[in-house]
Image: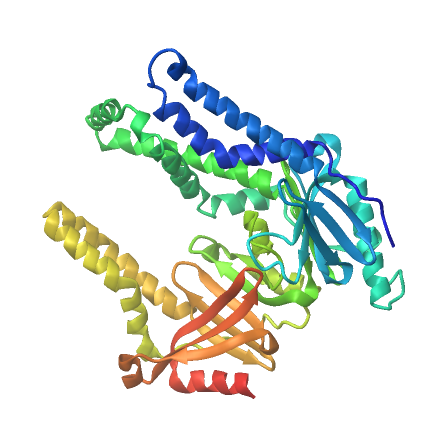
Amino acid sequence: MMSEPKRLHPISAVLNFAKGLKEAILPIVAIFFFNGNGGDGFLAWLPLILSGAFLLIILLAGFLKWLRFSYWIDEGELRIEHGLLFRKKRYIPLERIQSLDFSEGILHRPFQLVKVSIETAASSGLEAEAVLTAIKRVDAKELEKTIYEGKSEQSSFENDAEMPEENDRSLVYQMSTKDIILMAVTSGGAGVVISGVAVFLSQFTEFLPIEAIYEEVVDWLQFGIFIVGILAAFVLVIAYGVAVILTVLRFGNFSVFHDGDDLVITRGLLEKKQVTIPLNRIQGIRIDENLIRQPLGYATVSIISAGGSIKGGDEQQFKVLPFIKRKQIETVLTGILPQYALDVSPERPPKRSKLRYVIRCLWLPLLVSIAVSVFFWPLGLLSLLIIPALIGLGLLNYRDAGWNIREKQLMLSNRFITKQTYFVKKHRIQSCGYSMSIPEQRSRLSSIEVMVKTGAGKTRARCLYLDENDTKTIMKWFQT
C-alpha cells in the first residue's frame, strides 16, 4: 500500500501565518507602543520597520512550512515530513492510530477543507500525534478509509469488517436549539464573559483614562443604588446574551453517533468539529450537576478517555451529553455503554461526618470575613452574611456524598460547588487509597480516593469522611 506524497492545501500557509502572528502579537505591540517615541528621522520609522520585518519573517516562515510539509502512506505507515530549518520525519504505523478528528474553521469551509488531528495511544500530552492543518474533505475521507483498510489488513480481519460505512452510524443523542440556550443560561457563562472582558481590559489599563472613568462612576453613584442596580442588570443581560450566542455557535448541531467501535461527536455552526472516541479507551463516566441545573433535573455527562490530547480546549473534555435530563442519562448511555450500571443507590457518609462537611466549606471564608470585619468596621460585618449560605453548602455537600459497589463497578460521588459522580470499572482504576487525619481517626472516619487514566494524565475521584469500615470495604474490593 503506497500513495504519492501530498502537500497540504495552500490555505495552510495562511493558517501558519495566522498562528505565527498570534504568537508574535505581543512583541509587535511592544515594539509599537514602547518604542514609539524614539525621536526624529530614521528612529521615528524604526518601530514600523521592525514590525514590518517581523510580519515579513512570519509570512515567509508560514509559506516555507507549507512548502516543506508532505504526507503519504507507505508500508503500513502514515509518513510525514516537515521542518523549516531541520527536516523532521514522523512515521506512524496505521495499527497504532486510534482515531482521526476532523474540524472545519472559517477558512476551511469555503474551500471544502478540513483539519485532521491524528490520535494514537501516545497522544497523552498537549498535542495530537500529528495534525494536517488543511486538506480537501474528499482526501480526508480517502485517508480515513485507507487507514481503516490498512488496520484491517494488519489485524488479519476481513477488509470490510472495520470499514467506516456511513450506514453503520446510529444517532445516539442530539441537542435541540432550546437545549443549547438552556445550557448557556444555566452554565454561568455570563461570568466567564465578564471575566474575559475584565482580563482583556486589564491589559490596557495603562492606556485607559482611569481617572475620567472613576469620576463618571462616582457621578453615577450619586444617582443612588437603584440606577446602579439597573446598570448592573443591563451588563448581566448583555453578558448572558453574548454567552448564549457563543454557546449556540459552539454547540450548534451537536450530535453523538455510535459508529462500530467508536463514538463520534460532531458540533459547531461557525467551526465544525468531529471527535472520534474509541469505546475501548473509555475509562469511566462522570456526571456533573451544578447548583443551578441540579434543582431543574439537568446534568452534564463526560466520558473519561485514555486517548486524545488536551490542546484545543473543550473538545478534548469529551462532554458526550452536555445538557440532558438526569432521568434520561441511563436510557441514552445503555445503548453504547451497557456494561455500566447507573441506577444505583449510594451509601451515605455517617451522620457524625456532617459537621466536618460544614467546617470544610466554612473555615476559610469565616477567617476572611473576620479579617474584613476588623479592618473595615462596621461595614465589614456585612461579609458575615455569607456564613449561612456556606453552612447550607456544607450540608448539601454532606447530602450529595456517597459510594456504591456493584460487582466490578465503583461509584463515588462528591461535591464542593458542583456535584461530581464517577462510575469506574475496577480494571480501569490506576490506584486506590484512603487517608485519615488524627481527628478523623478519633471519629473513625476516612476519605477514599481513586485515580483513573486520561489523555492528559490522571483524573481523581473521591468521597470524603466515610465510615472507616466503608473505606476498608472499598479497599478490599479493589485488592481482590
Question: Which residue lies at the image location 41% right of the left edge and 79% below the top edge?
Answer: 434
Q: Position of residue 128 (x, y in %)?
A: 62, 52
The foreground one among 300 and 261 is: 261
Q: Is the image coloured rainbow, by chain, by secondary structure, or in one colour?
A: rainbow
The foreground one among 127 and 443 is: 127
What quarter of the picture does the C terminus occupy?
bottom right
Q: Is residue 268 above or below residue 213?
A: below
Q: Is residue 78 above or below residue 423?
A: above
Question: Which residue lies at the image location 86% right of the left edge and 63% below the top edge?
Answer: 153
Q: Is residue 334 visible?
A: no
Q: Position of residue 456 (x, y in %)?
A: 54, 60
Describe residue 390's horizontal placement relative to residue 15 as left or right.
left
Q: Position of residue 409 (x, y in %)?
A: 58, 77
Describe residue 238's horizontal placement relative to residue 153 as left or right.
left
Residue 9 found in image quarter = top right
Question: Which residue lies at the image location 61% right of the left edge and 35% below the top edge?
Answer: 16
